[in-house]
């Protein structure tokens, strides 16, 4: 019986390995970048960015995990009525050049370089989800260059919510060997159902339906040259995060802070928004009723109004 089980296991491994090699070969090749993208050199990275508006206080929007500058479009268009608005693809995401290491310090330097090269005068920095940690790190690194900080659907902490130093030991480890991990990634990226399910669970019923163009907007950054290898490195490293002590230091900085959460965000425990606001020295948080984790898509008007209010305090 043991021998039969061993033979069956060997057959399965050989079969799956063969499938993986054949599938990977059949799906090899990157897709081209969309036309009309805008880039700027920020230190060692060619950073892709989007820009809206021509006058007013600058607002810099930082996306979260597996997002891009495009995720901000609905909110940015509203803010552009009174502000110059910028959204960038953080290193490892979107269409920016992939340059390791994909850690919080490197992302922070990318943002600081962007502020410098674009000559932004004390922008309001808004970080969504894991982007909140990067926004906080930017403010801590150069407080005189930041006009205000907003945590949108994010607490800046590691995934386990502790003071363990964040991203350094928060990765997945990615023990899955080749060719299986490449096969798995491509199967996920090529599945419309995966994107729809993740979007619906994260964004909720208040969000606009995800069209074919919308799926492509989320999928394509994972299929351009260099994205696949970078995806494994980013996943291994984990999300951007800061220790609790660093976030407490944000409270002592003179710029205004703000915290905005979806009231039904499944990513966080009840009371997280209030705890986050107290930790970083912000007023009572704004809780958006019936909203989940993608408030910048589900409730752009409310988010834009909160950014306007923060800018008015800067």
Image (cartoon, rainbow, N blue to C red):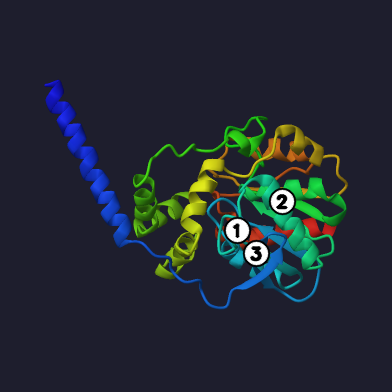
277 left or right, relative to 131 = right
Residues tagged 1 and 3 counted as in contact (Cβ below 8 A): no
Q: Residues within 10 Å of mark 1 (few under 14, many from 20)?
A: many
Q: Name the spot of residue 131 as percent of width and height, x first.
A: 64, 50
User: For mark 2, what is the residue?
Assistant: 108
Mark 1 or 2: the one toward you: 2
Q: Name the spot of residue 72 as percent of width and height, x first.
A: 61, 63
Give the residue drawn at x 81%, y 71%: 56
**Where's the C terminus, which quadrant?**
bottom right
35 left or right, relative to 17 = right
Q: Which badge, 1 or 2, is on the more N-terminal residue? A: 2
Question: Quick check: can you spot residue 151?
Answer: no
All told, the count of numbered labels is 3
Question: Quick check: can you spot residue 90?
Answer: yes
Disc 1 on helix, strand or loop?
A: helix
Mark 1 or 3: the one toward you: 3
Q: Nearer the viewer, residue 110 or 243?
A: 110
Q: Residues within 10 Å of mark 2 (few under 14, many from 20)?
A: many
Residues tagged 2 and 3 counted as in contact (Cβ below 8 A): no
Query: From the viewer's perspective, is residue 50 above or below residue 271?
Result: below
Q: Which mark is residue 155?
A: none
Q: Which badge, 2 or 3, is on the more N-terminal residue? A: 3
Q: Name the spot of residue 214 as percent of width and height, x first.
A: 46, 66
User: For mark 3, what is the residue?
Assistant: 47
Give the residue drawn at x 29%, y 61%: 26
Q: Quadrant of residue 247?
A: top right
2 left or right, relative to 85 = left
Q: Name the spot of residue 37 as percent of width and height, x first.
A: 59, 74
Separation of residues labelled 2 and 3 (CA atoms):
13 Å
User: For mark 1, what is the residue?
Assistant: 296
């Amino acid at each position: 019986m043991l021998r039969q089980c061993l033979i069956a296991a060997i057959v399965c491994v050989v079969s799956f390995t063969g499938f993986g090699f054949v599938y990977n070969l059949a799906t090899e090749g990157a897709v081209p970048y969309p036309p009309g993208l805008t880039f700027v050199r920020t230190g060692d990275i060619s950073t892709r960015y989007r820009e809206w508006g021509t006058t007013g206080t600058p607002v810099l929007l930082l996306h979260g995990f597996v997002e891009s500058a495009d995720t901000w479009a609905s909110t940015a268009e509203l803010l552009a009525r009174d502000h110059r608005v910028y959204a960038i693809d953080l290193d490892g995401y979107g269409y920016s050049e992939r340059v390791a290491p994909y850690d919080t310090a490197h992302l922070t330097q990318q943002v600081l370089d962007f502020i410098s090269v674009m000559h932004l005068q004390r922008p309001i920095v808004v970080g969504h989800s894991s982007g909140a940690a990067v926004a906080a790190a930017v403010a801590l690194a150069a407080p005189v260059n930041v006009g205000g900080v907003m945590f949108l659907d994010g607490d800046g902490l590691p995934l386990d919510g502790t003071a363990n130093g964040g991203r350094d030991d928060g990765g997945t480890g990615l023990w899955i060997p080749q060719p299986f991990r490449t096969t798995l990634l491509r199967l996920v990226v090529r599945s419309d159902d995966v994107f729809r399910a993740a979007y619906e669970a994260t964004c909720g019923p208040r969000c606009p339906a995800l069209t074919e163009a919308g799926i492509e907007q989320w999928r394509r950054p994972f299929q351009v040259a260099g994205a696949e290898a970078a995806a494994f490195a980013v996943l291994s490293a984990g999300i951007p995060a800061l220790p609790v002590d660093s976030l407490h230091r944000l409270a002592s900085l003179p710029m205004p802070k703000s915290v905005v959460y979806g009231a039904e965000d499944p990513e966080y425990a009840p009371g997280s928004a209030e705890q986050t606001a107290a930790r970083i020295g912000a007023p009572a948080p704004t809780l958006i009723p019936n909203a989940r984790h993608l408030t910048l898509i589900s409730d752009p008007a409310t988010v834009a109004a909160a950014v306007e209010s923060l800018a008015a305090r800067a």
